[in-house]
Amino acid sequence: RQHFHFFMAARRFGGRSAAACGAVLLLGLVATSSAFYLPGVAPHDYNPGEKMRVKVEALTSVKTQLPYEYYILPFCHDGVDLKAQDALNLGEVLRGSRIYETPYEFKMSNDQRCKILCRGKYDKEEVQAFALMIEEEYRVNFLLDNLPVAMPMFVESEGGETSKGYDLGYPVGFVDEKEGSGEKKKKDDKKKDKVYIFNHLRFTVLVNEDKSKRAGIRVVGFEVEPFSIAHTHVNQIDWDQCAGQPAGSRGQCSLNTCTQGKPVTQNQAPMVIDPNSKGPTEIVWTYDVAFKQSPIRWSTRWDTYLHSTDDAEVHWFSILNSFTIVLFLAGIVAMIMVRTLRRDFQRYQEQDILDEGQEETGWKLVHGDVFRPPKMAGWLAVCIGTGVQLSISICFLMLFACLGFLSPANRGALMQAMLFIFVFMGIFGGFTSARFFRMFKGNRWRSNALWTAMLFPGISFSIFFVLNILIWGQKSSGAVPFGTLFALLLMWLGISAPLTLVGAFFGYRKQPIENPTRVNQIPRQVPAQPWFVNFWVNLLVCGLLPFGAVFVEVFYVLSSIWLHQFYYLFGFLFLVLVILWLTCAEITVVMCYFQLCCEDYHWWWRAYFTSGASSFYLFGYASYYLLTRVHVAKTMKVASYFIFFGYMTILSYGFFVLTGFVGFISC
């Protein structure tokens, strides 16, 4: 029992990954404490009546990809310091999070009904701001005890079992689109469509209390049901005095639509806002709070959030499908290696390799040119070094993720860890780049090391900087502050680049990699090549196989990025990553052998591009995903497309460097 808390926390963070659970269980066996929790996620035990802080993150929408601060809209903010924000880590800042306090007052185990938050009178511009956010489907994201608010949804399976899931956040409002067809609908849509705002929230806080084990009460769920209610009142109300009071209290805060004993219902008249109204619009904001005992343990409270997008069977099917491709390619490689290469190498190891007069054929003709340094050898060394840096970074990232340290509970931890790991892995990139640069007979190793430190981060940062200016122009909270940009530059130029130079210094000092055969002084002429070893044909065919092995998992990763869904099945992702590397290695070995058999010894860059071509399929699939899954708002099409394709260019470039390195090193 002493390791129970550790294991349950690991189960909650690691999902269904057997590898993750096994690794965490192994660590649990050597733990010395009776209860262990991962950093930053220790539970808080509340006492009855204790005040609870309700916070709010940025407004988000899948239609624009531009987050905005919550108080960019004139929501109630009485008693809130709008200049004070919660301290955020680097990952949270980069993803556009801005966390503020709210005027909502919760007290543990104290149910409240029809509590008045405030009354607001809004002019035409403010109403239009609400209407625009509603039309673009922006959602509000409250936080309570580090749990995001969510709307519960129930899904019935084929077997008749009903499972509960969560839809993160709640919409600011909704648009009631009138039915119609043809040109009449196109002309009259804007006039007919009514815009409703959710001005009453019914919160349900799920709590777990076990007096036999502890004295406090823990929060294990945070749910919301939004209502649009046109509140009415008869008497004159002092709204300043009634703010924060239940309706009907003191005999002065009476509403006709709800009281402490009369809850709101969906049948009541909704709150309609008219963006074209010339006069002020009055909106009364109210909310309910109910505390409900739940059997959910604190260590598993995230399961409902994560299982909302859980398709384990699809992941397993994808892995089996990918594994089939790996076995097929492995069979081809084995056939080549066993039946051909081993026999040829045995013959070449003998002193009398060929009888006098016997001619060499196939790849044996180019054995004296196969290790001739390629054109633009320095750039190839830079790409190889960057690939090593990315590969090692991803391996460490997957390790920490599978152990649960990068769970959704630690907001921004994944992005922050990725940046820090990549920065410190620069020493391995510089070392590898210098080793290959010296093998290619290069002598300006400092220049090569600088390009290794600058090329991939420089291109990525340049795209990011341009996108940041665009986002800043839209007044979005997703714009990274200049202080954070300076911190990124400092990490890049002050840590990563010097480490890359240190690695290159030691790499270049080592003895150069010796080629197994001597390189001829005069290059051999390459004969005309058959169509199936054409460079573009290779890219078209060979790039498809690695991408085909991982495209199902790519779909879930893209959904987590652009549809704001949780991704936590890092065990599956690690298996798919291994399959990707195996597929890249095998397809590149096969195509490299065919190329050498056709007496073409220019294999260096071809090997890199053969598997790296899968990145072009990734970018193409991302474009298809944008058109079919991400329904961009008409008012934000240009900005949203720039953001989407900008970030996908960075991801595709990283994918190219990663897969290209694996393909090259396998040859």
Image (cartoon, rainbow, N blue to C red):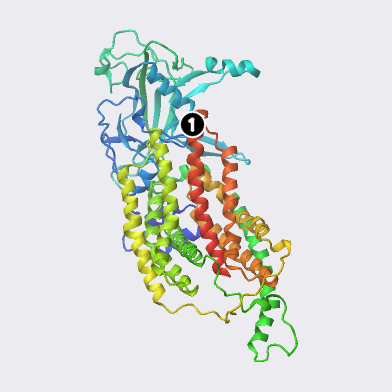
The residue under label 1 is which amino acid type? Answer: Met
Please identify the quarter of the rendering in which residue 6 is found: bottom left
Q: Position of residue 652 (x, y in %)?
A: 52, 51
Q: Position of residue 279 (x, y in %)?
A: 38, 10
**Residue 506 drawn above or below residue 99:** below
Q: Position of residue 75 (x, y in %)?
A: 34, 25
Looking at the image, which is closer to me, 612 or 231?
612
Q: Is residue 584 left or right of residue 9?
A: right
Looking at the image, which is closer to me, 600 or 537?
600
**Residue 430 drawn above or below residue 71:** below
- Residue at image mark 1: 636
Q: Is residue 348 left or right of residue 501?
A: right
Q: Is residue 212 in view from this perspective?
A: no
- Mark 1 residue element: helix
**Residue 463 drawn above or below residue 539:** above
Residue at x 58%, y 70% (from the top left corner)? 667
How would you rate the neighbour count of disc 1 (Cα within 10 Å): few for under 14, some for 14-19, many for 20 or more? some
Q: Residue furthest bottom?
A: 351
Q: Position of residue 204 (x, y in %)?
A: 40, 32
Q: Residue furthest right?
A: 357
